[in-house]
Image: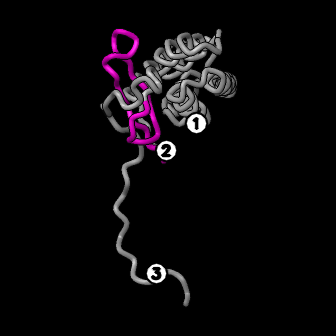
Amino acid sequence: GENIMSQSLITSIESTILLTPALPYYLEVSKALAEDNAHKAGQNLEQFRNQITKIIMKNSLKGKEKGIALEINLLAQKLETIKHDLGFLRDQFSGVSEILRRILDKYEYKEDLKLYLNFCPMALDKGAYWLSGSDKINNPYFGSEMLDCGEIKAEYGRKIKKARPMTGHAGHKM
């Protein structure tokens, strides 16, 4: 009956593809924090929050307490208040990154945008994670103070498939 229907709908969205529209803004926040730019970081975090809100509405995730929906709702909660203050933003960014890390560990991420999970053991006294779109370390927690402090812990994304060698313009009529 109706139950089976809603069940299959839930599994079909248990995928990180839901977050695709929001991720570029998250990556911009990371960049801005690495540049010690609170205003730019705050603006991009607000954009990230807008995308998360849209994702929740579009997929009717509000109030759901299971699976990826739960994690996405947690993201929204974490972002209720955004202050354009570096200390505040770095703390908040760490919480957001922690949730994204859980999502990427738990659900399949097969997007073209490759993500790197980085960790800085000295960040926020207890160590903190962040995701980046490049394998170069730009530490969002220390910025110019210790820009390259941290290491890559994991990589997520579509595995690059080896292309078959193509001789000349294969498939093109000359």
Residue with the mark numbered 3: 170
Disc with the residue nearer the chain's start (1 vs 3):
1
Left or right, residue 163 beside residue 5 = left
Position of the N terminus, as image quadrant, is top right
Q: Residues within 10 Å of mark 1 (few under 14, many from 20)?
A: some
Label disc, if present, on residue 113 of the rendered structure = 2
Residue with the mark numbered 1: 24
> CB of mark 2 within 8 Å of CB of mark 1?
yes
Report the magenta residues as a range.
Answer: 112-138
Q: Residues within 10 Å of mark 3 (few under 14, many from 20)?
A: few
Q: Amino acid at mark 2?
A: Leu
Residue drawn where x is 54% and y is 24% of the image: 36
User: Above or below — where is 143 with respect to 155?
Assistant: above
**SS assignment at label 1:** helix
Q: Nearer the viewer, residue 171 or 45?
A: 45
Of circles 2 and 3, the one toward us is 2
C-alpha span from label 2 to label 3: 27 Å
Residue 21 point in image, percent of width and height: 61, 36
Left or right, residue 67 beside residue 160 = right
Q: Amino acid at mark 1?
A: Pro
Residue drawn where x is 37% and y is 32% of the image: 148
Residue drawn where x is 34% and y is 62% of the image: 162
Q: Does the segment drawn in magenta span residue 66?
A: no
Q: Nearer the viewer, residue 52 or 26?
A: 26
Q: Nearer the viewer, residue 113 or 40?
A: 40
Position of the C terminus, as image quadrant, is bottom right
Left or right, residue 122 beside residue 36 = left
Q: Amino acid at mark 3?
A: Ala
C-alpha span from label 2 to label 1: 9 Å
**SS assignment at label 3:** loop
